[in-house]
Image: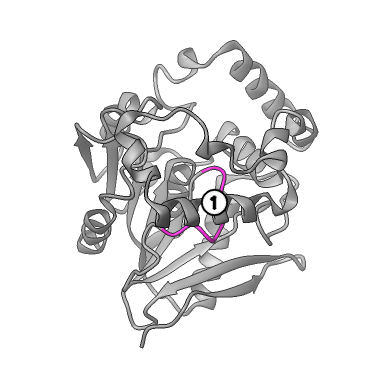
Amino acid sequence: MSFVPRDRETGLAGGASVAWREWGDAAGDPVVFLNGTPGSRLFCPDPETSLRLITFDRPGYGRSPPLAVPTLRAVAEIVGEISGDAGLERFPVIGFSGGGPYALACGAFLGDRVTSVASVSSWGPLDELEDAYASLTGEEREALAAIRSDPEGATQLLWERGQWYAENPLRFLDREREPADESIFRSETFRTNFSESNVEGARQGQAGLIGDWVADALPWGFELAEIGVPVDLWVGALDLGRAPRQAAEIARRLPSCTVHRLEEQAHFLLIPLWQEIVERSLARG
């Protein structure tokens, strides 16, 4: 039986909790989706989905309190807690953009509970890829050094840098984009969902955004070779981010990986290719 999206909450050790949402059909195939940076549980690639799709607020976003030191492993463990609360035994994980590193962490830390991982328009670990550090700007290297020397104190250091999100969570709607993404942003359904997600994500100001920055900048806590489940990398050739440059090297380091390079797509290929990504993820399990 289909049902309207509904919000739920899962308690965590230490008394904190995480907010999550179910979309689609309660009897549908379960899929866990990790939104990009920034965002919230309200972002859904297909609000009319027939899946049992699980989204959630990462720490600092929406209704989930921030962590003192955000890490990829901590979020993967939260996925484990949510999936247990939802009664999911085994499930694929799909991560988009800033959600991609967390999806890979789920593949590394949640064992055979995860059937497959799809990393969409995303990237790999800074410490493992050969030219990743060299491609950083001077400002990015300065932030990286500060985060690694004092992860907890980095929140305050980065607070001003992330202030734009607290002040205008819809700034992404006005930024310049690759032409291939323009038609996606002209969709009223997408713009509405994207806007609601970003406004909800900023409920605690820039806390979640900074949490993502810190978690990605710290050592990931696993090597790609430790991911024992099938992985699919979805890359738009017109994406100006790191994904097209890093995909081949990431794939070489993963035991079971397929790269899907779409020549006419850019960063937001998730939307037009959502059904294909889902079908592939389910088939890989």
Q: Secondary structure at mark 1?
A: helix
The residue carrying mark 1 is 195
Q: Residue at x 29, y 34 (%)?
A: 180
What secondary structure is the magenta-colored segment mainly? loop
Q: Is residue 163 left or right of residue 216?
A: right
Q: Looking at the image, is 278 positioned above or below residue 183?
A: below
Q: Amino acid at mark 1?
A: Ser
Q: Residue at x 22, y 39 (%)?
A: 259
Image location of residue 145, percent across then percent down: 67, 21
- The residues colored magenta run 37-44
Using the rendered view, name the quadrant where residue 157 is placed: top right
Residue nearest the observer in this picture, 277 or 232: 277
Q: In this figure, what is the number of numbered marks?
A: 1
Inspect the magenta stretch and tell me whether residue 241 lies in it: no
Q: Residue at x 42, y 75 (%)?
A: 88
Image location of residue 111, percent across then percent down: 41, 60
Q: Quadrant of the C terminus?
A: bottom left
